[in-house]
Image: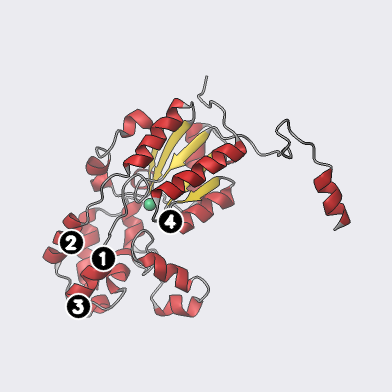
Amino acid sequence: MLRRARALTSRPASSTGRPATFAQVISTVIFDFGGVISSPLFVGIGAFEEAEGYPTGSLLQLLFGETHYIGVEGRAVAEAMADDPDAAEAAGVVTDEPDWHLLEKGEIDVATYFTRLSERAPAILGTEIDMEAYGRFWRQSAPGVHWMVVHKIRDLKARGLRLGLLTNNVKEFGEHWRTMFPLDELFEEVVDSSHVGMRKPEREIYELTCSRMGITPGEAIFVDDNADNVAAARAYGMEAVHFRENPWEALRQLDAILERRGTRRGHRS
Ligand SMILES: [Mg+2]
């Protein structure tokens, strides 16, 4: 205890009067796309599931191989299950890699994904899936853009910060999401899971992103709406913002980290 107190008081003070820290200043911010730059995905899937008469959680299980796919109503389920492995098991959290992951890693295409999904549906939903109704739901729940986030990204770029985008995505969706906002104007690097054969929260995809940008994780902030992806980024040594329901709150947290850590113009010479 004494040693700890002495260590704290012996730290040098910076000119601002705050203790100096040895953390690197921030050069780079890396953003997720779905639920961060876009508005949340699959909004209303719980109500759709109920309207179709499918058991609670079964549609999430069918689509994603887990009931707590984050970014949808599943978040509450995930948080309730965090300390209860029995409940998670009962809800069908699987250990085999779900088709959704294979789709996001570009190992299967969308057509294969939906063929397999239709085949598995009766065992999970208790009935055939009504693909026409699901198609209507999908079109109605198409996400928009969090323009306040896009404006923030533009502001960070003007301040000289470097910008990367790291997305778990689906090859066939590329033509759509890449045109929703000025992607190429804003981001120096875009790492798309379906093009690189790995996905968040696998550590390798964070390593790849940093390596492509020529940075160390300690000089980057990562912003994502999925708790697992945020935890993996922190474990790898990045600062991270867990983007939740309120975009303004997430941007406030991002600003607070930039203020605390300081920034430097990071463009490669
Ligand atoms: Mg996301």
Q: Residue 177 placed where, x, y %?
A: 26, 43
Dots 1, 2 in contact, CB < 8 A: yes
Give the structural element (helix, strand or loop) at label 2: helix
Tell me the distance, in whole angstroms, between the alpha carbons under discs 4 and 1: 17 Å
Residue 92 lies left or right of residue 218; in this view the side is: left
**Residue shown at the point (49%, 53%) measured from the top left:** 230
Label 1 sits on residue: 45
Instruction: State if disc 1 and disc 4 touch (CB < 8 Å).
Output: no
- Tell me: 170 left or right of 70: left
Per the image, the residue denoted by label 4 is 226
**Residue 106, image x, y percentages:** 32, 50
Earlier along the polypeptide chain: callout 3 or callout 2? Answer: 3
Task: In the rendered view, tell whether residue 78 sits above or below residue 111.
Answer: below
Report the residue at 48% width, 41% height from top.
208
Assess whether mark 1 and mark 3 are in contact (beta carbons under 8 angstroms).
Answer: no
Q: Residue at x 46, y 73 (%)?
A: 81
Q: Amino acid at mark 2?
A: Phe
Left or right of 7 on screen, residue 72: left
Disc 1 secondary structure class:
helix
Question: Which quadrant of the view contains residue 12?
Answer: top right
